Image (cartoon, helix red, strand yellow):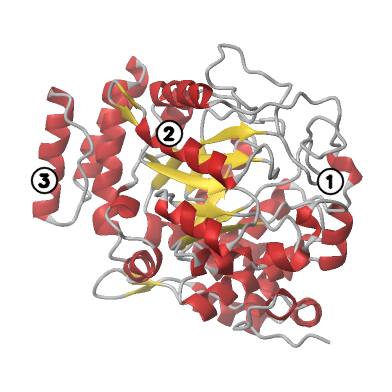
Amino acid sequence: MAVYDPKSLKAEEFINDGEIQETLAWAEANKENWALIDSILEKARPKKTETGCVCSGLSHREASLLLACENPEKIQRMYEIAEEIKMAYYGNRIVIFAPLYLSNYCVNGCLYCPYHLKNKHIPRKKLTQEEVRAEVIALQDMGHKRLAIEAGEDPVNNPIEYILECIKTIYSVHHKNGDIRRVNVNIAATTVENYRKLKEAGIGTYILFQETYHKESYLKLHPTGPKHDYAYHTEAHDRAMEGGIDDVGLGVLFGLELYKYEFAALIMHAEHLEAVHGVGPHTISVPRVKKADDIDPGEFDGGIDDDTFAKLTACIRLAVPYTGMIISTRENQTVREKLLRLGVSQISGGSRTSVGGYAEAERPHDTEQFDVSDQRSLDEVVRWLMEQDHIPSFCTACYRAGRTGDRFMALCKNGQILNCCHPNALMTLCEYLEDYASPETKRIGYAMVERELERIPKDKVREIARQNIADIRSSNRRDFRF
């Protein structure tokens, strides 16, 4: 029987079923132990230092206890602390990105994804490089600077060479004042050698969702194809970091398995990356199973309601305060609005989940990976964020300044990253306002920029940011950054 060891490189040792079962039993037994719960909440709370705020985070056992707690007052306190942590590390900034689907060819048999091999009534499509270029121009014309590219697993149709060629094409497109400045990659688990190639291509974060950490369920949900190999998939982030990729992203597809199990395992995975590499996950995504062609979410018995989803998100924020959290357009406006307060720091906007969807005037549905619940335009999303007092940020400065991996985490954990991120967010927002925003969004945006400039604590930084913004507004100069 495998023994739990967060420093092990074996999946069944760092994601250990016995440890998870013991954790869940302990959490259930102590979910009304108010003194213990209060002590954990106090541990999670941000502590002020000379440089800002620091948070200790929580172990998977401590966080699982909070998730098990059903007391409304304690849950409300979790929400309050989650918001405190969010503001301490990320302020009121929300990073915006868009997914770009390159190909839906796939050889896997995943039961929750319409791209599975046996689905014969979904059209199969793979973008040519000219089509990639057209998609990028359409995304740039919306105002996007950051993409997450997606592709099914198919060694014939989507080999690593195709992915690398697409990345090169994306970075090469300079249209009007538009540039894609960061390409994150969400593709199937691969080899150390291929991760080195992705690193050399200049990717940002390598993202790979586990879908479910419960091995028995994992094998049933992935009956055929390379993804059936639980260990190879679960150990992929270690290979990516061995290949030189500094920033990796985790994610669970909530709804496939019991959420408390998935939550404990997710936090254990973050602890494992920290223990082995000295750097936890750069991002954690929190998608839920959604309807799609040939997929009915009701077939899975692990579904969670909106209130549980909110508590789960808050508990992730308390456990791993330094990690960016992502919520996509799978969720509707109401859900996204609530979760933004509880720890989410990145959202997609104006997204299309079909292959080749952006260059078309009408939203195509025939090749969508899942139904998009939030179908607002990017301009509507930007305006909505500002009306909620969030700064829409298109910043990619840390990635391009080499503040990645342990360098980013060091700045984040001691609160120093705020000195870069706040002015960078304002400057990239001004780029959006000048080049892409509707008149009303522009009016609301510049009012926000004026207010937020005054919140920059350092006089010199504030004046440089103010001058850069003046240059953005009076000329075609772009891409200022701290």
Residue 212, given in percent of the width and then of the height, sits at 76, 59
The quarter of the rendered structure image containing the N terminus is: bottom right
Q: Name the residue under label 1.
A: 109
Considering the numbered disc 3 on the image, is that residue within a helix, a strand or a loop? helix
Q: What residue appears at the point 76 percent right and 23 percent down from the top-left corner?
A: 123
- Of all residues shown, which one is farthest toward the top? 361
**Kind of residue at disc 3:** Ile
Q: How crowded is mark 3: few (under 14 residues within 10 Å), some or many (20 or more)?
A: some
Does residue 88 appear to the left or right of 120 in the view shown? left
Considering the numbered disc 2 on the image, is that residue within a helix, a strand or a loop? helix
Q: What residue appears at the point 63 percent right and 27 percent down from the top-left corner?
A: 355
In the picture shown, does residue 224 fall above or below 144?
A: below
Does residue 117 appear to the left or right of 352 in the view shown? right
Q: Name the residue under label 2.
A: 170
Query: Viewer-nearest of labels 1 and 3?
Result: 1
Q: What residue appears at the point 47 percent right and 54 percent down from the top-left corner?
A: 197
Viewer can see residue 287: yes
In the picture shown, does residue 247 fall above or below 106?
A: below
The reply to whether discs 1 and 3 touch (Cβ–Cβ < 8 Å) is no
Residue 296, given in percent of the width and then of the height, sits at 86, 37
**Kind of residue at disc 1:** Gly
Q: Distance between the residues labelled 1 and 3?
A: 53 Å
Considering the numbered disc 1 on the image, is that residue within a helix, a strand or a loop? loop
Does residue 320 appear to the left or right of 202 in the view shown? right
The reply to whether discs 2 and 3 touch (Cβ–Cβ < 8 Å) is no
**Kind of residue at disc 2:** Ile
In the image, 479 versus 340, the foreground residue is 479
Query: Viewer-nearest of labels 2 and 3?
Result: 2
Q: Earlier in the sequence, mark 2 or mark 1?
A: 1
Give the numbered dot on residue 464: 3
In the image, 383 versus 216, the foreground residue is 216
Q: Residues within 10 Å of mark 1 (few under 14, many from 20)?
A: many
